[in-house]
Image (cartoon, helix red, strand yellow):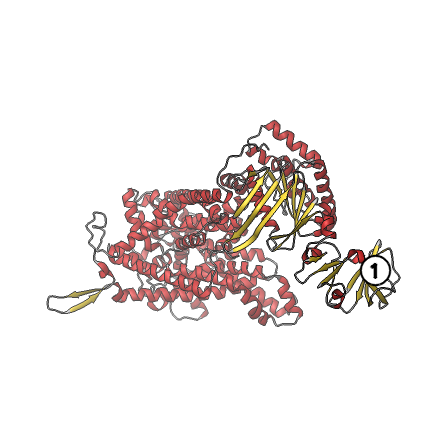
Amino acid sequence: MTTSKIAKGPSLQQQRVRAAFWFLAPMLVMLAIVAAWPLFRSISFSFTDATADTIFNGKAAWVGFDNYIEQRVRSNGEIRWRGVLLDAEWWNAVWNTVRFSLVSVALETVLGLLVALVLNAEFKGRGLVRAAILIPWAIPTIVSARMWGWMLNDQFGVINQMLLTVGLISEPIAWTARADTAMLAVLIVDVWKTTPFMALLILAGLQMIPRDMYEAAKLDGIHPVKVFFRVTLPLLKPALLVAVIFRVLDALRIFDLIYVLTPQSDATVTMSVLSYRQIQQFGDYGEGSAMSTLLFLIITAFVLLYIKLGRVDLSGEKS
Amino acid sequence: MSRRTPFWTVMFYLGVALIVLIAVFPFYYAVMTSFETGTAIFSPNILPEMFSLDNYASVMNGRNFIRSVGNSVLIAGVTVVCALFLAVTASYALARVRFRGRGLLLMTILAVSMFPQIAVLSGLYELIKLFGIYNTPFALMLSYTIFTLPFTVWVLTTFMRDLPVEIEEAAIVDGATPWIIITQVFMPLLWPALVTTGLLAFIGAWNEFLFALTFTISETERTVPVAIALLSGASVQEIPWGPIMAASVIVTVPLIILVLIFQRKIVAGLTAGGVKG
Amino acid sequence: MAKIELKNVKKSYGAVDVIKGIDLTIEKGEFMVFVGPSGCGKSTLLRLVSGLEDITTGDMLFDGERVNDILPSERGIAMVFQSYALYPHMKVYDNMAFGMKLAKSSKEEIDKRVREAAKLLQIEHLLDRLPKQLSGGQRQRVAIGRAITRDPRVFLFDEPLSNLDAALRVQTRLEIAKLHHQMGNVTMIYVTHDQVEAMTLADRIAVLRDGRLEQVGTPTELYERPNSLFVAGFIGSPKMNFLTGPFAAAHGCETLGIRSEHVVLGEDQPWAGEVLHVEDLGSDHFLFIELGASEPLICRRPGKTDIALGTKVKVGPHPDHLHRFDKDGKPLR
């Protein structure tokens, strides 16, 4: 290597940081266009009276927080309050979303843990079972909604048929239409579709636990149930926490399953569905955006809370 | 499961059988229904009663179903390729270069992928109208980037972080610039990860519903999920279950095959990203 | 071919100082070994020389020219890594040629240099293989071959033998020593935590501790005239015997150090003890003698022994080879 004349340039670290900037720039510009700007605009709309007609011609007027909460004085002096925050329908949707998220994630975690424990055991045909549980995950949500919609059909559904045969019910149930069973139907489909995902994440966590650990416990004659609660579960906690947070975030924004499976039911309408209805069906961009902004705030608050409480290292920087 | 009593062994295998049954049955039932027509379809049965391809014929002959499949393939394909292209360099920077604010940037990217899509809907709608791409595939390619891009960046960053530092340093000593390191040293090592990430992002884009429902209006521009969701008869009572199941099977079988082929890699990808299902 | 000078070189990561001011000159063609316990900063120091890490303050000169801001690839260095760091997807030939290709050398030139290096290391038959088809020892040879192909002014080795098994380690150590003789005028810097590697390979050894240079000198100097208690304890196997309290006070020091081969057995010796354990290595043997000090005294003697366990013996230091240290661990001469 001839080195008589060496050009003086930036140091290695400077060169790398500069390259990193140019490598990140296109992605950041793209994200600014498709995420940051639309988010900003959506939030802005929530402070206007924009409708499908006024949204593009700039005639939407600034109304401050009126979409959220507004005081109206009628001509006869009576004071009326209105706005999303006073809307019973909105609070119903909030309650539905929270209810759905808590129950579905709890069920998915417990069932996922069970399936993962089964898959972590050594037995003949394990590969086949793992392949089988991937199927629900691979099926598009819309397709599974329709498949289950068919199976849960009141007149011709196979589920009613089976339950009738066994004698658990005396007459067919309109699962997706009845107010008291619609949420159950949604939960069944979501748990069916998403438990495999949970199981695989937990299984990966389980497989990180060194086998010696179990062998040591076995040699010490510790009961397997005790081993599970004292050894397995604590070691699994980080993987479990990450899986749960991702699932909760996903559940909080659920839209497609409910939109297709129980389109009209008030018992299942979630924040996303209600906001969509407000925007698309009623053309009320102002209130619809106010709802979506509230959902955004709730999710953000949840993430911050979770990171604070769980000290989850989501970025994986420390590992 | 070593040294168990026969009773527990039987219970264990019963449990396994139950898991498999629950996982597979709905799809089996959909396949079976898709082969039935006429009155057979309306009598719930567990074993096949008849075999007819009429439902498939009616779906394929329907005006726009094949077109919808084409739309879905095109949109998901282009979106994923673009996302991967931007993500490879970005994830190198995030995984390999120390700079201030890196942790914050990573968290922001993760946050974007966790966005409730409804929160950007009206803003995105305005943007799409502004660009004049409403009701075209471009509208969906643009809007899908909001989740495919952060997702691919995130997963590739995890993979990229696992590549040995010393190989990169050897390349630096050999005179490789960051660009050369990515293209000539890391890319050949990363292609399995790229395939996995691409496949997962593709599935995500393929399954997307909200944007597809909002940003297309004519039947010819629809993607598969929208087409299936909106497939309906003349009245509520006449939902064409046979064709719906046939369509469902058509769009699901390729996915299931892909997933089964790549199952090991997919599990690795899912754990790397800790991602959504 | 290069003389390397470090002038008050410091490196810190945020508030943590890893290298705390090092002045060192490495002569042309010298084989310099950085040695020290883990976390002493030896690898960081090597990376500062290579340019993979930026120097926080101070100057680094190659042949009198400041190289602080010069990229690793332009410094004329080559580096051999602990994990070999071969490009897994490239054949051996391409691994070795990669640097020259990036430097836009001609095909003939590259081919000539790769084949010369391969011949020197006797890996010509491996050129068409992928790294995963090679054994650990072969991989390390290829890594060295890649370094040779670059025709560097300075060779850097970062614990190159740590991943090899014991037998291969001795063999490769010999290879590296041979290489240094053959390429007589190339400067080599070698990092290891193994003082045996340091003693056998080095022209000079730099002992590092906690980000500072503890002592620099030839293996003999370090062995015979350690500059501190730390160096005395670190260099040499078995470890130097350290005695404190009345044993040391009798010689007017805080700590008395005696190499095991300088422990003398004899009726006229001052210290009485009992043989705890005997290690017989064939060529010589070690006696572990309990004196009532904090650790048993190790005595090394040639040949075989018939001294049985529990034998009462009298021992003492060879008067010409006393290492006396004050309470700061500094030698008294």
Q: Is residue A74 left or right of residue C236?
A: left
The answer to whether residue C233 of the structure is visible from this angle is yes
The answer to whether residue A178 of the structure is visible from this angle is no
Q: Residue furthest left?
A: A76
Query: For the image shown, how many numbered marks are present on the structure?
Result: 1
The correct choice, above or below, for B4 with respect to B46 in the image is below
Name the amino acid, label 1. Val
Decide: few, some or many residues near mark 1? Use Cα within 10 Å; few <14, some 14-19, many ≥20. some
Q: Residue at x 74, y 54 (%)?
A: C236
Chain letter of the residue carrying label 1:
C
Q: Residue C24 at what x, y percent from top left?
A: 62, 46
Where does the N terminus of chain C fall, quadrant-wise? top right
Foreground residue among B220 and C208: C208
> Element under label 1?
strand
Foreground residue among A24 and B113: A24
Q: Residue C204 at what x, y percent from top left?
A: 69, 46
Q: Is residue B168 left or right of residue C194?
A: left
Which residue position is annotated with label 1?
C264
Q: Residue A165 at what x, y percent from top left?
A: 44, 68
